Amino acid sequence: MEATRNKEICYEELKTLVGKSQNLLVVDVRSNEEVAKGHIPGSIHIPVDTVEAEFSLSPEEFKAKYGVTKPPPDAPELVFHCMMGRRGGIATDKARELGYVNARNFVGGYKMWAEKEGK
């Protein structure tokens, strides 16, 4: 069984990647109402109950819909998050089932991000 820590990313590590990494894709799996109140810079919004369908789109469909390149299955920096961690964990598991072997959940979610960023 895979170690849980490999499926998670902490605030400090994510903060270092945001704005610096060309490979990073942050996926916000919260509701529309939650996203409207604030989001992590550069993140795209895919509600948790649609993650499986959206990550099954062709690369062309994904790019047309989200304006970013669909990550390859071995993408090194694919991060899911919700408000505190539960839905992000569900999304991470779904992505891993689809073959995204490095998908990780930002534990603490937007709640922690907003607190640390003073939002």
Image (cartoon, rainbow, N blue to C red):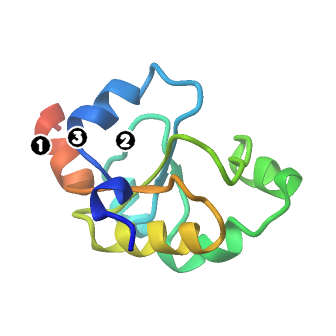
User: Which amino acid lies under the numbered mark 2 shown in the image of this protein?
Assistant: Ile
> Picture coordinates of residue 45 (x, y %)?
52, 56
Q: Which residue is mark 2?
A: 40
> Picture coordinates of residue 72 (x, y %)?
72, 48
Mark earlier in primary sequence (3, 1): 3
Residue 115 - label: 1
Quadrant assignment, res 100: bottom right
What secondary structure is found at the residue carrying circle 2?
loop
Q: Residue at x 18, y 33 (%)?
A: 117
User: Which amino acid lies under the numbered mark 3 shown in the image of this protein?
Assistant: Tyr
What secondary structure is found at the residue carrying circle 3?
helix
Q: Is residue 75 above or below residue 13?
A: below
Q: Which residue is mark 3?
A: 11
Q: Residue at x 50, y 24 (%)?
A: 21
Q: Quadrant of the N terminus?
A: bottom left
Residue 49 - label: none
Marks 2 and 3, how far apart in space? 11 Å
What secondary structure is found at the residue carrying circle 1?
helix
Quadrant assignment, res 119: top left
> Picture coordinates of residue 47 (x, y %)?
51, 70
